Amino acid sequence: MIFKIDRKEAITRFQNLPLRHYDIKEDEEVFNYPKVFANYILTLPSKSYKGHIKMFGEELVKLLEALKCDYLIFLGDSDLAWLRRFKEHESFEDSFQYLISNKIGKRFNGAIQVPLSEIPLFIKHLAWLVRTNGIVQYVHFVDPNQNIICDICQYGNLHISSKTKAADILLKNAVSNIKFEYLCEDTCYNKFSKSSSIKGRQITV
C-alpha cells in the first residue's frame, strides 16, 4: 500500500528532493538540485518498452534490497497536482486510475511513499505517465536516508545520483550484481524505435 505525505512536510523531511519554481521577475524557471557526488544513467538490455519497464521494476527492487532500503519517496518538482492532466487523453488514463485507486485525489501535490512490494507496479504506471507526458512535473525519488536521488526519463532510463562517496561505493557494488547497465552516451534516446518520436506521447499545454 502506498502512503501520501503532505507536500510541505515532504520538503521539510526530504530536503534532497529536487524542486522547481517560476521566477516572475526573471521570467524563467529556477531549478534547485542538491549537490551530489556523482551522476549516472542506467538502462537495461531489453528489446521492447513493455518488457523494459517490467524488468525495470524488478531490477529496481533488487537495487533497493542491496542498498537495504524498504521504500522510496516520490515527489513532483513543482507544486502541480499529480492528476493535473486527468481525463485529457486516453493514453494515460489507466495509470491515473491506478493513482486514484490508491486514494490520490485530484488536488494532491505531495509526496508518495511506496514500499518495496509495490515498486514494480508503481514504476510501471509512473514510467508510462512520464513517457506519454501524462504528468506535467518532473518526478524525483529518494531513499529514506537520501543517499540516492533518482528520476525516470521518457525513454525509460534511470537517472541516478549518489549523494556522498560512501553512497557511491554502495551504489556501484549494487549495480554490479543486477541487470542495470551504465549508458555510455551522454544523452538518452528512444532505443525501441528508429524514430525519435514516442507512441502515445502528448504535447503538454
Image (cartoon, helix red, strand yellow):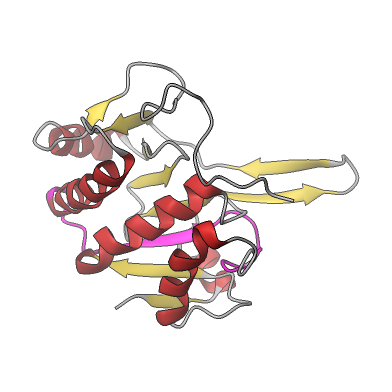
Q: Of residues 48 and 77, which is closer to you in this image?
A: 48
Q: Of residues 125 and 114, which is closer to you in this image?
A: 125
| 57 is within the stretch colored magenta | no
Q: Most prominent secondary structure in the magenta stretch?
A: loop
Q: Of residues 196 and 112, which is closer to you in this image?
A: 196
Q: What span is colored magenta in the figure? A: 66-83
Residue 107 picture quarter: bottom right
Residue 37 picture quarter: top left
Eyeballing the image, is 161 above or below 184?
below
Residue at image location 77% in from the left, 49% down from the top: 22
Residue at image location 55% in from the left, 45% down from the top: 201
Q: Residue furthest top?
A: 185
Q: Position of residue 174 (x, y in %)?
A: 15, 39
In screen coordinates, is 174 left or right of 158? left
Residue at image location 53% in from the left, 76% down from the top: 6
| 76 is within the stretch colored magenta | yes
Q: Position of residue 108 (x, y in %)?
A: 58, 75
